Amino acid sequence: MKDGDTAIVFLGHDSMFPVKVQHGGQTQTKYGVIRHSTDLIGKRFGSKVTCSKGGWVYVLHPTPELWTMNLPHRTQILYSTDISIITMMLELKPGSVVCESGTGSGSLSHAIIRTIAPTGHLYTVEFHQQRAEKAKEEFCEHKVDHLVTVKNQDVCKNGFGVTNVADAVFLDIPSPWEAIGHAKDALKVKGGRVCSFSPCIEQVQRTCLAMEEHGFTEMNTLEILPRVYDVRTVSLPVADLGKGSDDPSSSGMDRTSKLSQASVCSNPPQDVAQFKSGVPLKEVVGHTGYLTFATKSLF
Amino acid sequence: MKDGDTAIVFLGHDSMFPVKVQHGGQTQTKYGVIRHSTDLIGKRFGSKVTCSKGGWVYVLHPTPELWTMNLPHRTQILYSTDISIITMMLELKPGSVVCESGTGSGSLSHAIIRTIAPTGHLYTVEFHQQRAEKAKEEFCEHKVDHLVTVKNQDVCKNGFGVTNVADAVFLDIPSPWEAIGHAKDALKVKGGRVCSFSPCIEQVQRTCLAMEEHGFTEMNTLEILPRVYDVRTVSLPVADLGKGSDDPSSSGMDRTSKLSQASVCSNPPQDVAQFKSGVPLKEVVGHTGYLTFATKSLF
Amino acid sequence: MAEQSKGDPIEDGAYVVLKRGEVFKAAQVQTRKKVIFGKQWIFLDNAVGHCYGTAFEISGGGKLLPLIKMEETATETMEAGADNRNIVDDGKSQKLTRDDIEALKEKGIKGEAIVQQLIENSTTFRDKTGFAQEKYIKKKKKKYESIITILKPCTRILAMMYYAREPGKICNLRYDTLAQMLTLGNIHAGSKVIVVETCAGLVLGAVMERMGGFGSVIQMYQGGEPGRAATDCFGFPESFLGMLHEFPLGKVQSLLSGKFSSEITPENTQDCLQTDKKLNGSPNEKEDASNEVENSISDRVLECSQSEEQQIIEVSSGELKNNNENENKERKQQAFEKKKRQIEKRKREIEAADLLKERNADGLIIACRFHPTPLLLSLLDLVAPSRPFVVYCQYKEPLLECYTKLREKGGVISLKLSETWLRNYQVLPDRSHPKLTMSGGGGYILTGITVVREDVRPNIKSLELQKTDEPSPKKLKLEEL
Amino acid sequence: MAEQSKGDPIEDGAYVVLKRGEVFKAAQVQTRKKVIFGKQWIFLDNAVGHCYGTAFEISGGGKLLPLIKMEETATETMEAGADNRNIVDDGKSQKLTRDDIEALKEKGIKGEAIVQQLIENSTTFRDKTGFAQEKYIKKKKKKYESIITILKPCTRILAMMYYAREPGKICNLRYDTLAQMLTLGNIHAGSKVIVVETCAGLVLGAVMERMGGFGSVIQMYQGGEPGRAATDCFGFPESFLGMLHEFPLGKVQSLLSGKFSSEITPENTQDCLQTDKKLNGSPNEKEDASNEVENSISDRVLECSQSEEQQIIEVSSGELKNNNENENKERKQQAFEKKKRQIEKRKREIEAADLLKERNADGLIIACRFHPTPLLLSLLDLVAPSRPFVVYCQYKEPLLECYTKLREKGGVISLKLSETWLRNYQVLPDRSHPKLTMSGGGGYILTGITVVREDVRPNIKSLELQKTDEPSPKKLKLEEL
């Protein structure tokens, strides 16, 4: 790590935050202070850092995924699950030229830039001035500003400001159907791919109609939902059916362990079946948005 | 089993069919002939029956669920997963009075009758004459005709033909929004529950608007999808990383078995890890329909 | 005509469900008794006499004021912005402070009025889109309003309530999964159903509701007595109790082996009690833990029959020399009462045993915290052939094992391991989509159908048949239907 | 400007993807070579010179006729019925017999014309609703029409194609799961990535595409040589090959223990081969099985270095006395070629080893039919700290074990076991809904991030840290960001 780097301070799976490494800088954590000059600069990414109160944290190399998990939310952001399928379905790779609107919190922008670097370019349009400026700053801070052009305008009215240069266009705006024509104009003559992200089905319906009117083909709407599992060791007690200890095998079960239970009643040891299970969280993501993909064909 | 009973001949999980038990009757199966008088009449439901070619089948007591799996499909039918949630969400129980349209293949009708018997009643309306008549026949055959009234009319135009008697109304018709007023009329003065099943979201949108206009409350749209798992024993080979046999534990894995592989190259026995897994089928039900529930309130 | 009335009135003592927004709470109507609902104290006294389905506003002091007409309080959305591009979120958009709001509340200003004040004091509300405005109102309303509806309990409501509020008490059994169990289990009036559950009696109640008082339900339980807290919430009529039986799991083996005695002897009632004490796990027993010493004395009291009453007291008093005469008398009365209950319990146990011994149950439903395999393998012997059974488990793995063992044992066909996905939707003009959060899992179900088991040991032929249990459907051709 | 052109023309020898409806097939353009696509023979000769994205009609004899404009052949829906209540399905609604249709086809009548004939000869078509009519036309069109589009291959297309056509060859890795792997694995230009896969080279190809020729990819393989059938289908430019390396899994242990030798000695090349033979599983090796005897001779040939050539032949001829001089000469040439290849292979192996030895890979992607645990535990030692890794498995259970072992071993944080649900939609006016079938499962992914491992044995402090790996987020408060 060196002065000016962005690093992610990792306290736990759901607890991390980005930090700008600076000579003389200090960062407070619940484990105490991290002193940049002594604790970070010169260390490898992935190192354990002991904070002033004696607790430890890890300092990580930023990736677009860690950034997405920890960025300052200026808007509802796109999650890695959606970003993944968008990247593949838009056929992004080094050298791709991409148009995006809105920039929002920049979570997708960072992922796009990672993928199209070092030879591609991202044109991102954001109608909210404050957000556009903040995004520009972040791109500079993350040293990717040469790969991206940020514009503060209304894509539905003014388009992307470029014509026939893009391999792919991504829309995450309230009325994507108003921008389909501009998307078509931005795409290369030989064609390309477009994607629109919308939370509501009515937006999708209008967008699909607009895509059809503009001659897009291969239209496909999908939804992708992440399912994360907790890995747990589960113990289930075995009911006592009064079989006694004379025939333990007759229960027809593979008993994996016998736990003697401490109890005032001095209960007999109770059979317990133990296993590993990947358990879903009680409440999970139910919907992020619909993704509609289409191709601008050669013909 | 006795003459006149309906029984289900079970050949395998996805292979069964209903049969009407008759003195002197015969039924062909791939395992040979079943002679009703000797093979079925007087036997218990659940018995093994040896067919003429020596193969065996089971003869089962019909339930609405077995019936749903095996009934003659006159229309797209409702599956047990949807039927289950409909029954609970409509608060059906013995004594409930229910209105249904359309009758269709009668798969839901049979399940409703099972639940509201012996003191409830089903009014079912089907606009397709042939289907209405076939349903009537089946109710007679299954000896539940005293619990159900079948009408051949258009529910959107003519309603259910009863007023203020129903605890619950179920709609599975192309334009449910046209029947919401009739549904309200059919429900008891003190209120009740209504459910509409529609495959398309546009139908749901219109139906919800109609429900709101008619003063229904507690509106709730949901979707329920069955996920069936194959129980399999899976073996995964363990890659040879060149560790040799000197330190088998260093691979860090619980090896459950070593299979010696017959091979011309006389390979060393290969490690295999074995486990039980509940594996989803490759292609599964992706959608049946949206279920919209609502309450006709007292006020 | 009774059907044409506005429905049944709420009576004193009735079991009801309170509903606020999408939140339910079960309660019993008892005069001058406080009920807590979402941090608010409520007295249900005023509900008596009103019909089920009536909405009430909670007034100061927790009293209920019936609303004549439940209105969707539609605050008209005024001057909505086209989009939210001009909104700068600086956290200073609301001019009312938290203290201001608290002050309003203390003045007795009602929820709806507070929301209106919040809107008027928001600098950004007018610039929000219509959608955002509505979202804002909804959020604030939920926070400050207090209208509740009183409903008649039923499986739908109680199952949703338990899943939302206390999923741990019902083994995380989601309501749609319970719905599957009732349907796949073919639960209906007039059948004989065995239920094993540790879901606070919710599954039992659901089964009883579906049977409508016709037929019989035998609840198998472990511990002192079956858990039925949720069953009580259904508020079933007295007449339903006739169909309800219970039998201790600890005596299943003796029942199956034919060793179960149907006589009421001192040994039996003692046995009945000892079983209770030996097995842990019942919620009741846990509550009793603090009374351990006292209970252990009562236990010994009950080792003897009624005619030996005097003797018992001597034993007791021998151990409790510090107690005065009065306490001894009380204890004597208690012992007598408890013994009566035990004998009553023993009678019911024998009744249940008689039903089970016929080995012709029409259904078997298991939903409990115990490993399902030993339970299922034993209890299936009490079910008639050609009957469905349903086993619920919160985890998939035990049901995989269960499936395998059942296949080995035989006597069942059409085994199916499944779960359901449940997705709720928001359907609003131009804003329809699946709800943003959903349940991660509702648990797993293993179902099957019993068949006649001809041989205990599988011979070649039955093995062959077992193979045909799951043939490829394409290979089968039926010459004639 | 090149960008303004209609795109690259299809060249002879190019790898392309044929698309008909929603069905893909990878092919290589080779003049006068037949390609089978859905029971039809096609010659791709005429495609050469046309741009990617061009649609062709397959004419008689399998020749391609370019279509000037791809039209959605909208047969106007005429006289649609309001609903389908009057339709009696008696199976006799179509007057054309199967023979009639075959006759039409033999006459060379094109697909679209056949569909038109079918409509005209259907007695019920006019009574169907507009929706049902459209459905009917679509179904029939699919059956009788033959328009294909020729596309440039890419990960999206090939991943979807393999999942639809040959999921068994790619361990049932669904395309969206592959998409997750590439993103979560942080695959990008300029990094050094280790790939272990038995997905026909699809995962390798996807990684290479994402790296665009910048950086290096080391494919670890078991068996004779790495499977790359799908990688070939990408049609990567020659320049991409420079970043591609391969290393046998069987030598991972010697590499990790420092025993791996980087010299090209006879023993080494022999070793190289023996490893190949010892390990089974490569598709190539299976194909070679019939040549077993011959190969075993060649093997021995390669036990010696080039200078010992003469001797080898003598050994060979000693065993093959029946063979004539000519055959011996051929064999000699073959042996020489094979040996050259082996030495080349050994050179590449050493190159790959040099890359791996630095233990600073930027990423690790595993997607194979082997149990993931031993692979992952060993290969993580070759990855730099603070780098993501991704392991795919078709089943959940092995990844549960993997997770547990990784936790025990340490050196990784942010472990996450997940899968994705993929739902496709039909969006049509008034007929929008999720597709009626969906994939049952796309497999599971375990991801994590490597960190510096300070001690081999966990001391108290590191155990403590391990506990803080998954703290409750609510309990953490950051005083300052």
Image: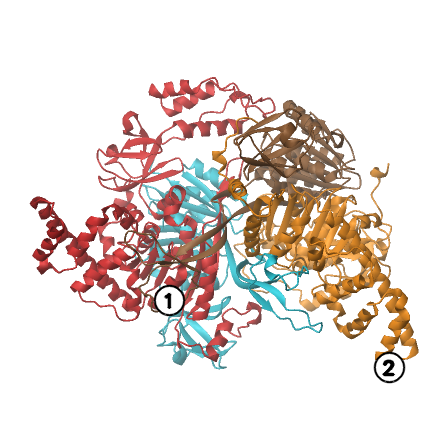
Chain colours: A brown, B cyan, C red, D orange
Residue identified by numbered label 2: D321
Judged left or right of residue A32, residue C306 is left
Q: Nearer the viewer, residue B78 or D208?
A: D208
Q: Nearer the viewer, residue A261 or D116?
A: A261
Q: Amino acid at mark 1?
A: Pro
Q: Secondary structure at mark 2?
A: loop
**Percent coordinates x, y for residue C133 in the rendering:** 51, 26
Q: Using the numbered discs, state the Cα–Cα distance from disc 1 to disc 2 in whole angstroms.
A: 69 Å
Occupied quadrant, residue C17:
top left
Q: Residue at x 80, y 39 (%)?
A: A189
Q: In the rendered view, tell whether residue D160 sits above or below residue D92.
A: above
What is the chain letter for disc 1? A
Q: Which quadrant: the N terminus of chain C? A: top left
Q: Residue at x 31, y 47 (%)?
A: C230
Occupied quadrant, residue D84:
bottom right
Q: Amino acid at mark 2?
A: Lys
